Image (spheres, grey):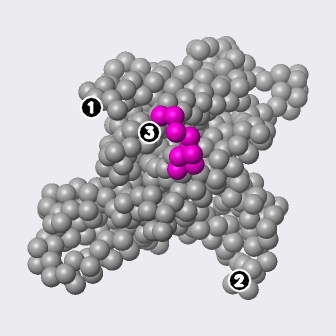
Amino acid sequence: MISESLERQIVFLFCLLAAVHVFIFSTAFPFFNNVDEQTHFDLVTRYAGGDLPRRLDPPHEEAMFYLAIFNTPEYLWPPNSFPDGKIPPPPWTLPMEQIKLHVMAVEKAWSKVPNHENSQPPLYYALAGLWWRLGKAGGFHDGFLLYWLRFLNIAFVVLLVWLGHCTARQVFPENLFLRLGVPALIAFIPQTAFYSINNDVLSPLCFGAAFLCLARFLSAEIPGVLLGTITGLTLAATFLAKISNLPLLAVSAVVVTFKAVQWARTGKWRAMFLPLFSLTMCSALPIGLWLAWTRHVFGDFTGTTAKIQSLGWTHKPFVEWWGHPIFTPLGFWIFISRLMATFWQGEFSWQGVPLASRTVNSIYTIFSLAFVGTAIVSLLPKFAAATRLQRRELGFGLVGFAAGIAFLGLLSIVFDFQNCAYPSRGNPYFISGRLLLGSLIPFLLLYLYGLDRALCVVKKKRFRPLVLVALILFMLVSEVVVDQPVFANPYNWFHM
C-alpha cells in the first residue's frame, strides 16, 4: 500500500500527462476533421456572439472565414485526387488575391449546406463560446485562435482524470489497482474526440459526475438536500451536453425510482422527500426548459426531425426492421466490434481511409469483451468477489453502457439512410463510439475490475502495475504509429 499523499501525487502526475497528451495530438491534427468539426465550430462561434440557433442555417460569416482559410482536404481526399497529384498548399500561404477568390468560392459552397447540429443542447457550445471570446480578449487570432478553442479539451480531460480517481475511490476504496488504473487509462486513451471541437467531450465529465453523485446518494442512509441538488444538476448537465445521453438518463431515472420505492417500504419516505424532490426538480427543470425551447423553434421536443430531414433519412416500416443485418451473427459482430474500436480510438479518417489499425482495433475489441465479460461473471452473488454496494454500482454502469449500445442499435434499424455517406444503406450501422463516451468512467471501472479478477491467479502484487504500464504503453505506441502521418501535415499547428 502507498500513502494517501503519494497517491494524490501520482494522480496529479496523471493529470499533467493527460494535459500533455491532449495538447500534442490536438496540435498535430489540422482543421477541420471529418467528424463534423466544421458544424460544431460554427455553433461555438454563434454562441460566442449570443446567437442561439432557431433553424438549420448554413454556417455564418465568422465561421466561413476559418472554414475557408484553415481547412485541409486531406481528411477526405488523397493527393491523387488533385490535378497535380499533390495536396494544395494552405490558403494562408497564398497571395492575397488568391485567398479572396478561395474564400468566396468556399462561402458559396457552404451557403447551400445547413448545419444539422443546430438543434443540439447548448452546454458545450456556451462554454466553448466563452472560451473563444476569452481567447480573442487575450490577443489570439487566426489559426492560433482555432487551436486555443481545441485546448479547452485539455481542461475537460484533466478534470475527467481527477473525477475518474474520485469515482474509483468511492466504489473500490480498498483496491489501489483500480483507484490508479482508471485515471491512468483516461490520461492515455487514444480517443480522437478529445483532439477536436465537438460536444462529445463533455459527456464523460457530466455523466461521470452524475455517476459519482448517484453512487453517494444511493448509498447514504439519508442523503442531504445539497447532495440531491448537485446530483440533479449533474444529470441535467448530462442531457444538456449531448442528446445521445438520453439512455443514461433513462437508466438513472429507473435506478432512483427503484431506490425511492425501497425507502418508502422501510418507512423513510418523509426523511427522503426533500432530497428526492431537489434531485427531481434540479434535473427535470433545466431539461424541461430546453425541450420546450426546442419544441418552440424546431417543431419537436428533441429537434431531431429537422436534422433527419436535412440528412435525407426516412423511417422504415416496422415490418422492415427485422431484415437488418444486425440480427445475423456476422452483422452483430460488425456492429459491436466497430463500435468498441471507435469507442477507444475515435473516427478520424485520413486521405479517405479510417485512421486506425485493424490489428489494434481487434485487440481493443477482444480485451473489452473479455474483461467486461469477466467483470459480469464476477458480479454474480455466488462468487462473492464484490460487496453488495460494488455490485450495485458496477451493475448500474453496465446497464447504462448496454443501454447506450442498444440505443445505437435501434437507430441503426429504424432508418433508411438513403444516399447518406454514414451510416449508409450498404453499411447501416451507427458505430460512433464517441456517442458512448458518457459511460467512459463506469466502463473503465468494469474493464479494470474484470482485468483485476482475471489476474487473481497471479500472486505477485507487482504484476498488476506491470500490466497497467503495458496497457498504457500499448495505447500510446499504437496511437503514435497510427497517427504518425498527420504530424508532418503543413496545415497543423507545427507549420503555422
Q: Is residue 280 left or right of residue 57?
A: left
**Which residue is depicted at the point 62% across and 18% down?**
92
- Does residue 336 sit above or below 129 in this rendering? below
**Which residue is depicted at the point 47% across and 34% down?**
461
Q: Amino acid at mark 2?
A: Pro
In the picture, the disc for residue 317 is 2
The one nearer the camera, 84 or 369, is: 369
Q: Marks 1 and 2, how far apart in space?
A: 58 Å
Q: Marks 1 and 2: which is nearer the front?
A: 1
Residue 52: in sight, yes or no?
no
**Which residue is depicted at the point 39% across and 54% down?**
207
- Does residue 219 sit above or below 253 in this rendering? above
Q: Kindly check if marks 3 and 1 are in contact, taking CB atoms under 8 A apart as contact.
A: no
Where residue 155 appears, as percent x and y from the top left, is 38, 32
Q: Amino acid at mark 3?
A: Phe
Is residue 460 shown in magenta?
yes
- Name the residue beneath numbered marker 3: 177
The one nearer the camera, 118 or 338, is: 338
Q: Quadrant of residue 320?
A: bottom right
Secondary element under disc 3, as helix, strand or loop, is helix
| Number of residues whose C-alpha sits closer than 10 Å to that of mark 3, classed few (under 14), some (14–19) or many (20 or more) | some
- Does residue 268 sit above or below 311 in this rendering? below
- In terms of sequence position, does the residue under pointer 2 or pointer 3 come before the other? 3
- Name the residue beneath numbered marker 1: 4
Q: Amino acid at mark 1?
A: Glu
Is residue 342 shown in magenta?
no
Secondary element under disc 1, as helix, strand or loop, is helix
